[in-house]
Amino acid sequence: MNFLLSKFMWQNGTRINQYLFATIITIPLLSFGMVQGWLSPMISVLQSAQGPSPEPYTSTDISWMTSVTYITAIIFGAPMGYLTDRYGRKIMTLITTLSLILYWQIKLLCLEPWAVILARAIAGIPCSACYIVLPIYLKEISDIDLRGALGSLLILNRNIGYLSSYIFVDLLNITTVLWIGLLVPTVVFFIFLIMPETPEFLVKQGKIDEAKTVLAWLRGVSVIDSSLEEDMDKIVKADKQTQADTKSAWNIIIHDRPTLKAFIITLVIKITQQFDGYLIVLIYAGFVFAKAADSITLRLSPNKQIIMIGVVQLLGSIVATCIVEKTGRKLLLVTTSLAMGVGMLTLSAWFYVTSENIWLPGWLPVLAMCVCIFADAAGFQPISYIIITDLFTFQLRGTVSSFANICAKLSNFVQMKWFNNLSELIGIHWTLLFFAVVCFAASFYTVIFFPETRNKTVEEIYAKLAKRKTIEKKEVDDAKSIP
């Protein structure tokens, strides 16, 4: 680490190291995107007699292969926040990267159903860690005015991973794709060995001088810079307050009103994001293309359809990265959840009307589907991860991230397991309408309750939440006093 700091110690105030570090931090999520992206175009290949397995995969094999990751993600995700706070962001990121290496190695050795299901179970580690550890790591190495843009790199890199897998599977043989998949986390693992820990965690360990050196490296300033001294004093003071507070994280969350309100806001946004229909749109993309084929001139192979979806995802992520620090979290969340709602409502209406044998243009559901995918990637998804680091202190980030991750993975598992049954029972149009209602409700909730967090400290956000509570209480008291 000292070698790294000495070679890239800029002394002109540039923050290029933050961009460089943030990009490296999010590459494990790019690798996990490749893990997830490999699955969609490969299902039909694995089920065919000419597939890489001695025996074609059964529907039961596919069911386990698609769902087991979310089961193990819940198991591994439960202690992830504690482990991140106990052993550090760097150690947990290295473990995450090792699990990705193990995933690709298993598939290189064997592609029989049991081996792929085992690999997918191991993928539960990065499935949790990438969404718990990496956002915390990013937040703690980013300046306050960069944390939104750098935080959005998480979803951007994940979607690059998705698209990479879609393209590789379409153009290359299976073994080559697996070797590329293994190469990415292996290279990142060795790069990460020389990367520093976050200043906040170093202060927690009592390594004040090392924390100051890392912070100076991130800021591109001298270790004797006056502004650096002020920020270090704030970090040290916050750590002392944390050490002096003997209450558990859950005790603070439950009994401190602003923290509880922040926790509720986080859960509502996180769960509504999981139930915005994004996963289902991806699963049903091929079905939508097939239904639209009778009245649309666009003819794409299944793989080309998946690549098109990947491009739309990537474009949405690029937009989020470019504008999140300009628009703020609240406006972006409101507009993208509204767009998701409109897209889902349009899909629902199209499926219902066409089920009544009434003709509607085939481009309509394709456009609605692309709007949903773009909007989710442009705002709903990245913001749901950014706000956890915006709304909580060092002491609480790991706990809240772990709990929110468990809720998210349970939501994913429920959708993956029971969506087909529910659609057969009540019709796909009513199920899509439910997703539309969730999106509109999320937009309304955000307008009313979500505080803008851009360029604000946790203390400033909590002061705003506490003030809102005081205003509400005053209005109630005033109402009671009216004869």
Image (cartoon, rainbow, N blue to C red):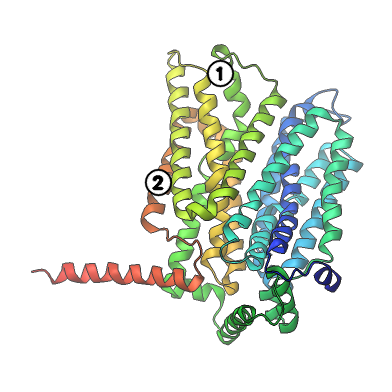
**Residue at left 48%, top 74%?**
459
Q: Between 82 and 458, which is closer to the camera in this rendering?
A: 458
**Disc 1 to disc 2: CB gap under 8 Å:** no
Q: Which residue is mark 2?
A: 441
Q: Between 197 and 322, which is closer to the camera in this rendering?
A: 322
Q: Which type of secondary structure does the marked residue at label 2 adopt? A: helix
User: Which part of the image, by quadrant, shows the N terminus?
Assistant: bottom right
Query: In screen coordinates, is 36 left or right of 189?
Result: left
Crowdedness near tag 2: few (<14), some (14–19) or many (≥20) residues, C-alpha within 10 Å: some
Q: CA distance from mark 1 to mark 2?
A: 29 Å
Q: Position of residue 46 (x, y in %)?
A: 80, 30
User: Residue furthest toward the right?
Assistant: 109
Q: Which residue is mark 1?
A: 292
Q: Quadrant of residue 52?
A: top right
User: Which part of the image, by quadrant, shows the C terminus?
Assistant: bottom left
Residue 363 in view of the camera: yes
Amino acid type at image mark 1: Ala
Amino acid type at image mark 2: Ala
